Amino acid sequence: MELKTEPLNDEYATPLLSKDWSENPGKPLSSSSSQASSFQDPKRTHNRVLDPQQQQQLLLNPGQSITSQKSPLHNSDSDTSFSSNLSSSSISSHNFDSKLPKMTVSETPPEAITSTSANGTNGSEHKDPSNGTSALLCKSSASARQIYQGPEFPVGPLELSALAEEHGHTRGAIASLLLDGAKFHKSDGYTDRAYVLEKCAERLSDDEEKKGAVDMDEAAELLARDLLYTDPIKGIDTTGSGGGDSGDHHIEYRKHVFGTNAIAAKEFDSFLKLCWDALQDFVLIMLIVLGVISIVVETTIGNEADHCTTCWIEGAAILTSVCIVTLVTAGIDYAKQGAFARLSQALNDRNMKLVTRNGKQIEVIDADIVVGDILNVNSHNLASIPADCILLGPASEPLKMNESSLTGESVPVSKLPGDVILSGTNAVEGSGRMVVIAVGTSSVAGKIKARVYADGAGDELDADEDSPLTQKLELIAKHIGIIGTVAAVVAFGASTILGLAVEGEDVENLVDYFIVAITVLAVAVPEGLPLAVTLALAFSSNKMMSEQNLVKHLESCETMGCATTICTDKTGTLTANRMTARAVYTDQQDFSPTEASQTLGDHVNARGLAKESISLIAKCISIDTMNETTLNEVDSSGNVNGGIGNPTEVALLTFVHELGYSYTSIRDSTPGRSTSAQLKEQLSRGKQLNFSSARKMMSWVVPKTGGGYRVYTKGASEVILERCNSVHLSFVSDSFEESVLGIRGAIEAYARRGMRTLALAYRELPEGADLEAVSSSVSNSDGTPALKVETELTFLALIGIEDPLRPEVPPAIEKCYKAGIDVRMVTGDSPNTAVSIAYQAGILRDEHFIADERVAENLRENVLMEGKDFRSKVYRTTSDGLKEFDQGAFDKIWPHLRVLARSSPDDKLTLAHGLNQSTLYEDKSKCKELKRDFDIRIFPDRQVVAMTGDGTNDAPALKRADIGFAMGIAGTQIAKDAADIILLDDNFASIVVAAKWGRNIYASIQKFLQFQLTVNIAAVVTALVGAFAYQQSPLAAIQLLWVNLIMDALASLALASEKPIDSLLEADPVNRSDSMITERMWFNMIGQAGYQLIVTMILLFEGPDIWGYEAGDIVEQDDSKYDDYVGEPSEHYTMIFNTFVWMQLFNEINSRHLHGEINVFKGLSSNSLFIGIWVGTAALQVLMISFFSHAMRVKEGGLPADIWGWCLLFGVGSIPMQQLINAVYSITRNYGPLRKRRKQQSIRDVSVRSIP
């Protein structure tokens, strides 16, 4: 076997690692400072570079020392002569000024190398005490050993991560790193390289601003080249001696040293763990204990213990119900984990980035990006930043980044070479080339993600608690357990007294009495309740997916139904996240459409603006915009579906389209602007003056057909207006000064409405005008002289641009207020912009203002707050100088607060925590004061808070809120991981849909409770009466299993399938402390259970006389005349069982309604699932009565037709019985004393929300 290696001639080359090492990255054997030549540094005389013949010898005999062989290239007399021929060797040694170390092999046998931990900075270096070399031992494909050397980097992940965290002060941080690098290289003898680094670091410490940009540009390149060993232009060099796939080895080495960019996803909970979590439910624990006791008693000391065939079935049925509930719950949770993981993986696999390696641009996924990669980004289709980087260029125009996902500040931040570009941010303007410095958990976004995945121990703001539904169900379960235990004790006590004292039975019958008591307890516990809750949540969560809500945690479905406050973002949630031109001022006229559905272009055309003005506006916008900004294809209805590039320019080009013009046609027909074949030769006559922050404008000079030039300009309205000396008008105006006053008034009016303003202007220039000349009297904002062509302009138009409100948002917020849910807006925008959107959305109402003009300064106190003011008021400074949250101060603010502007993600966390922990509702005097003075009503319980978020720093707030909503489109992965529900369409209206479904879940569980507890009341009383009268229950254990588990489980799914109706949002949220069982439900349950008991008692005691069959207690009793004889199932008890089931089936129809509706069949025809389940359950009942005699303990051959008719008649009787219950309830409500008591109660229960 021949090992082929080739010399590496490119500068900044880096070493290669074998493929086998990448499979076993945990085996580095030695370490070195890898920058010095093995034969030029006397300290490293043990290192030798081998020719192919020597390498072959090492491969075949890895345990032997290698000696130089005589060859034309190598002189064996000395190492010096050996090294003198390296230039033509197949493996070259290293000269630092030209390249990095390639590969060296230690003369020490590989088996003798000892690894010891060394530099803790990068965590991957290991020292060989014999020679100090840095090496990695790898196995070749022939199982032989070979040592590939990797570079020892001057910096490690900790230092680079610290640099990223200093993103606002990179100058000093980079200088410090360069000095560390200089020391590193100087220690290896490379004084020239160290000198360059030291000098650059000194210049960085200089405060002369004019040198700064140049110094940072050079420093960034030195960091890439001399600290990360990356060519700033060509990127990482992965070519060389490793063969065709050697690049993978080098990339793997960098991952080994600096970490990977694939942050370990939150581990799935195993299925067994999910099962264990499900078993923590109080009801299930109670059922397990009951089931075990039942089996032990029946099989050891029961009547049938000696000839037990089915005596264990009751206990086994209970345990079976536990297993079913546990497996279903765990299975649903496990499937949800998998579905979310697949969704995340699909998004990640499509998320490609462009990096430069070996001088070529290649696409890689985020996980394959390593420290040292040269990343190429632009604001069009490669905008998101996957790792922390240092910007290398270009230096001509700043790259603008949106850092709102980390800082909450929506204003783009300009970046120059040397600045840190943080992971999780997005490029919004320009393009850039940057070197990656921190990946994975070393990056800023990665650290936040690690916090999200942590358990949150010790963080008081991350404390979680059970959902309101869980708390209420646990309370109900405890009450049922107590009632069941009392009933069992009563049954045992009564049986004992009646049997031993009255009947004089033997003491041995105590065992029978105990078994009867256990049966009563088993009947009392609603075995189907946990399954019903799980099925209701699972069914609803699946339905919510089709309505743009991806539910990650089942319990969050119902929790959203109890929400009292929604804290929502503005951009993308309330608004369309699409900049849109909504107003224009031209020809001394304001054009502002009043209807949200009408576009600005349609409004302008309808108002009859002069065609000349419209044409000039269209030309100015079309010509004076960047080529990179384009519109998407027009749909069938003629509308534009967004665009790519600068959002503001997309809005302007869309306005041109609305006016009826084609921006592409205007560009293609304009000499000096067109790149078409006909006009391409005139392209050089035009001139583009790119936008700069100093000029705050952009211009395009184009030649005119008759000679001369026309300059089209757009930019900041105030700047453009100052440069104008005339105004374009289609009519004669009084004076220029009056026109300017009108324009300034429009600028102020648009700003108060929350719009950004841009001005359009133009200028006519004569032939031969100097397009480079500067003005001696007009300056740019930075003090530099302005270009003459951008002065003495003619004002054309003022355009107001906004991110428009989604049209479905105002109705959705109106529904929230009707439903008793407060809506608060949290945004990073300015106060006026926030007020404008909040007022349009309906979050702010007329009552919140103290003057007619709807602007921030006219709001009542604390209705709007800026983030800095909010923080200063709700945090106090302790004696130790630490900031501490002040709940009392917060409680003075939040009842009034509707808009939080210029906020940070930490403000969201504070808001969620403060609202959730507030106990203001307990201060009745304060609540009355707020109602009297401000007409604000306080929810009479703790707040249930829903929070939206899309940024990385929103994750802690999403975790802290009762329900966290992440944006599915604009949201970062970290925000999605922290959320309970993901809004797939980023739309606030979908939050209202979630609230409606949540309330529907609550109602569904109430319906099931009404149904289940009616069954339990009737069954418990029947079992007690049977125990008292006959010392056995007329309903067998297997029959109770059918009623309490299987039939109830089907009923729960049927009742959960009821679709939500709009009337659910017309009631207030339910208090945390309110019982799930309302007064009306008690009436329904007691009334129906009473009817069922009357029928059952008639059948039990009078049935044999009325229908002529033999009494069941006689037929089914044991006959002591025959050994092992057990009584046969009787027609008597079979009729009781059949009638009991049919009464439950028809009462299931009644249970679809909770408020005494007269038409209990309303909406039934539209619920095919309910009909199917009901019919299926009825069919199963018929089959069991007819064919499953011994299995179901029913009469052989079933029941005769006349008995069937009576059973169905008693069952149907449940429906008219419900109407009687409704009538009785209405009468009692109108009864004076009861009505007065309810009125007093309603006064105490202050309403849910604060009035807007």
Image: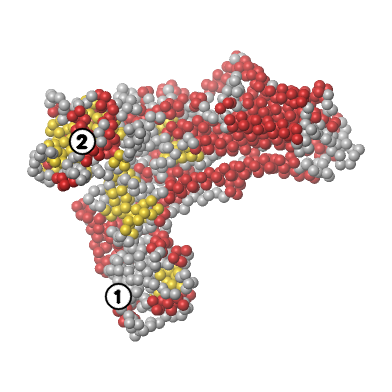
Give percent across and percent down for residue 1241. 56, 22
Marks 1/2: CA–CA distance: 64 Å
Q: Please, which residue is most extreme toward the right here?
A: 1121
Amino acid type shown at disc 1:
Ser
Give the vertical position of 800 relative to 340 (above or below). Answer: above
Residue 1047 pos. (x, y %): 67, 34
Which residue is label 1 attached to? Answer: 87
| Label at residue 989 | none
Residue at (63%, 41%) from the top-left corner? 325
Name the mark nearer the viewer: 1 or 2.
2
Residue under label 2, please give it: 619
User: Is residue 369 visible to the viewer in this orientation of the structure?
Assistant: yes
645 relative position to 966: left or right = left
Q: How many marks?
A: 2
Tell me which label, 1 or 2, sits earlier in the chain.
Answer: 1
At mark 1, the secondary structure is helix
Give the vertical position of 822 relative to 37 (above or below).
Answer: above
In this view of the protein, can residue 1009 be seen by the observer?
A: no
Residue neighbourhood size for the residue with mark 1, other residues' Cα within 10 Å, grouped as few (<14), some (14–19), many (≥20): few
